[in-house]
Image: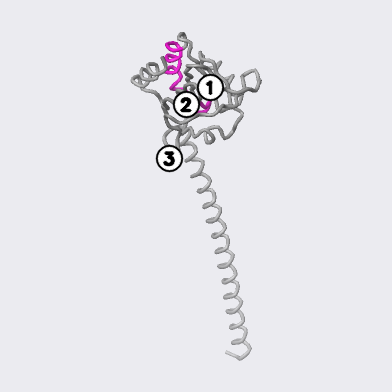
């Protein structure tokens, strides 16, 4: 082997090593970027999953609204698009609130129970109000599709559940004059709970 041939061999080896190093660096960078993106996606999905569990009533809030606490006036919007407030200023009155989401399967399953409560409680003069956390269009369609019999409004407050510390939907709230919370039932109601709601509301 001549000196020139040896030199060319070393040069080729160095170039190959350099090229291999560059490819390794590129591949490593791409993998890091992909892993970072995947991590971000997992974090976002985890947050969405937690929100879904809270809304479905599976995951409870530590600071959830409790009996004896006061519920402030609620900003509402009728299905005709008129804004107003749901206040608890009547004398010796009791209010039943059915908090629902049109996309919640547990709320859909709970509709017959709420309808039964409304049928048994409304004739006594108690206020029974369905409160949807979705917009008027979605809520109107939901009511028509599922034959909802109780009076229903929506809330334009996108942070309603957090603001009023309602742990999830479906939620059934019994509130007395002055906004004093008498009881809170979260999730689908059992037959025993339906009887409990009716007895406490009357």
Q: Callout 1: 10 Å neighbours few (<14), some, many (20+)?
A: many
The location of residue 86, given as percent across then percent down, is 57, 22
Q: Earlier in the sequence, mark 3 or mark 1?
A: 3
Which of the two labelled residues, at mark 2 and mark 1, occupies the earlier sequence position? 1
Report x, y in % for residue 184: 42, 27
Q: Nearer the viewer, residue 192 or 68?
A: 68
Q: Residue at x 39, y 23 (%)?
A: 189
Along the line of sight, the residue nearer the viewer: 72 or 133: 72
Residue 196 sits in which quadrant? top left
**Contact, mark 3 vs mark 1 (Cβ under 8 Å):** no
Dominant secondary structure of the residues highlighted in magenta in the image: helix
Please tell me which residue is depicted at 48% across the width and 22% down the height of the picture: 98
Tell me the crowding category of disc 2: few under 14, some 14 to 19, or many 20 or more residues within 10 angstroms, Cα based: some
User: Which mark identifies residue 155?
Assistant: none
Distance from disc 2 to disc 1, alpha carbons, whole Å, reads 9 Å
Residue stretch in magenta: 100-121
Residue shown at 43% from the left, 17% from the top: 112
Q: What whole-number distance in Å separates the C-alpha atoms at marks 3 and 1? A: 25 Å
Label drawn at residue 180: 2
Q: Residue furthest top?
A: 123
Query: Which residue is found at the position 49% from the left and 30% from the top?
Result: 70
User: Which of the 4 image quadrants contains residue 144?
Assistant: top right
| Tag 2 secondary structure | strand
Q: Tell which circle, 2 or 3, labels the residue nearer the N-terminal end.
A: 3
Front label number (2 vs 3): 2
Question: In the image, is 133 to the left or to the right of 199?
Answer: right
Question: Crowding at label 3, few (<14), some or many (≥20) Cα neighbours within 10 Å?
Answer: few
Give residue 5's quadrant in the image. Answer: bottom right
Residue 190 magenta = no
Question: Residue beneath label 1, please?
Answer: 88
Question: Is label 2 in contact with label 1 (beta carbons under 8 Å)?
Answer: yes
Question: Label 3 belongs to which residue?
Answer: 62
């Amino acid at each position: 082997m001549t000196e020139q041939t040896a030199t060319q061999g070393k040069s080729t080896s160095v170039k190959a090593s350099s090229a291999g190093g560059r490819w390794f660096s590129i591949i490593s960078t791409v993998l890091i970027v992909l892993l970072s993106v995947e991590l971000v996606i997992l974090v976002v999905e985890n947050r969405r999953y937690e929100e879904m569990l809270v809304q479905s009533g599976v995951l409870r809030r530590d600071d959830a609204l409790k009996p004896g606490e006061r519920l402030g006036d609620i900003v509402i919007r009728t299905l005709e698009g008129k804004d107003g407030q749901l206040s608890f200023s009547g004398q010796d009155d009791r209010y039943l609130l059915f908090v629902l989401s049109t996309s919640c399967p547990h709320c859909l399953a709970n509709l017959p129970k709420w309808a039964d409560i409304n049928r048994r409680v409304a004739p006594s003069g108690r206020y029974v109000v369905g409160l949807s956390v979705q917009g008027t269009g979605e809520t109107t369609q939901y009511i028509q599709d599922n034959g909802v019999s109780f009076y229903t409004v929506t809330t334009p407050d996108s942070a309603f559940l957090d603001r009023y510390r309602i742990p999830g939907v479906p939620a059934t709230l019994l509130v007395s004059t002055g906004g004093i919370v008498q009881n809170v039932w979260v999730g689908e109601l059992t037959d025993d709970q339906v009887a409990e709601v009716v007895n406490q509301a009357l």
